[in-house]
Image: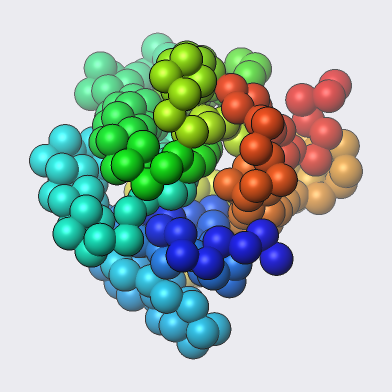
Amino acid sequence: MAGFEGRVALVTGAASGIGRACAEALAREGAFVVAVDIDAAGLAGTCGAIADAGGQARAEHLDVAEEADWARVMAGVAAAGRGLHILVNNAALCIHMPLKDMTLATWRRQNAVNLDGVFLGTRAALEPMTRSGGGSIVNISSVAGLKGIAGLSGYCASKGGVRLFTKAVALECATERNGIRVNSIHPGSIETPIWVKMQNGGDLPEGSNSVDQMMAETRSVAAAATPLGFSGLPEDVAAGVIYLCSDAARFVTGSELVIDGGVYAG
């Protein structure tokens, strides 16, 4: 057990995929989870699963690119009087598109969620986390934040920004001696809805058959491109989050944890 009893963890993009896995894992370890997303139905599923497993969670609507939403949610965290100890900036948007076809609006849409959202969340968490005696911020980047991938220029740019933003803030926190550690995780091919959304302008296509077919196709492609021969699961990333948020990682800050089945090694 990582021992998160008495700690409060806020997880963005918690309605599905990696965010849901992180929320459930943190709750299993004893944290009270504030699960945030724009998907109300998905959040209800996440919080319901946590409650069924004996954990504690509260759902909050939050658009990570909206500064006012962050102020409202953080005010609620403060009013609850439990403090804030963990922040997982996970919400993301990926759109597969050649640069020659990409509009400025599409470029900005990805950066608003992937980079602005991390900036707003991290900035909003600093004061309450400092008051709580310190804590851990984990920013979910991507292996696409470490290397270029054709057709993902906007996504690569935003996730590369998350990587260096993380390092800079980690050094600021270390200088201030506020007890806050900041690290990034770089997943490779993880089986989440983002696989399907990236081929459809960032949104899920209509029809479960289309989604299932696209998931099967991308799973096959991902397995072939991954040295270990299979794609990862959201729980694989959640395990890294648990480590980075635990006391076992007390000497780890400004680092990047790659969870990609060996893709970046080659």
Query: Which residue is at a point 42% across and 75% down the rendered structure image?
Result: 56
- Indicate left or right for 62 with 36 as reference: left
- Looking at the rendered structure, the number of numbered marks drawn on it comes to 0
Q: Tell me if residue 213 can be seen.
A: no
Front in this rendered view, residue 55 or 174: 174
Residue 117 in the image: x percent, y percent?
A: 31, 34
Q: Assign the N terminus to one quadrant of the image.
A: bottom right
Q: Assign the C terminus to one quadrant of the image.
A: top right
Front in this rendered view, residue 67 or 226: 67
Front in this rendered view, residue 66 or 86: 86
109 relative to 128, above or below = above
Query: Which residue is at a point 81% across and 50% down the rendered structure image?
Result: 230
Could you say which quadrant of the image residue 64 lies in? top left
206 relative to 56, above or below = above
Residue 110 in the image: x percent, y percent?
A: 35, 30
Q: Tell me if residue 18 can be seen.
A: yes
- Indicate left or right for 235 with 200 as reference: right
- Indicate left or right for 62 with 186 as reference: left
165 relative to 68, above or below = above
Query: Which residue is at a point 11% across and 40% down the rendered structure image?
Result: 68
Coloration mode: rainbow
Could you say which quadrant of the image residue 39 lies in? bottom left
Residue 7 in the image: x percent, y percent?
A: 46, 59
Query: Which residue is at a point 86% across and 46% down the rendered structure image?
Result: 229
Residue 127 in the image: x percent, y percent?
A: 28, 35
- Indicate left or right for 29 with 76 as reference: right
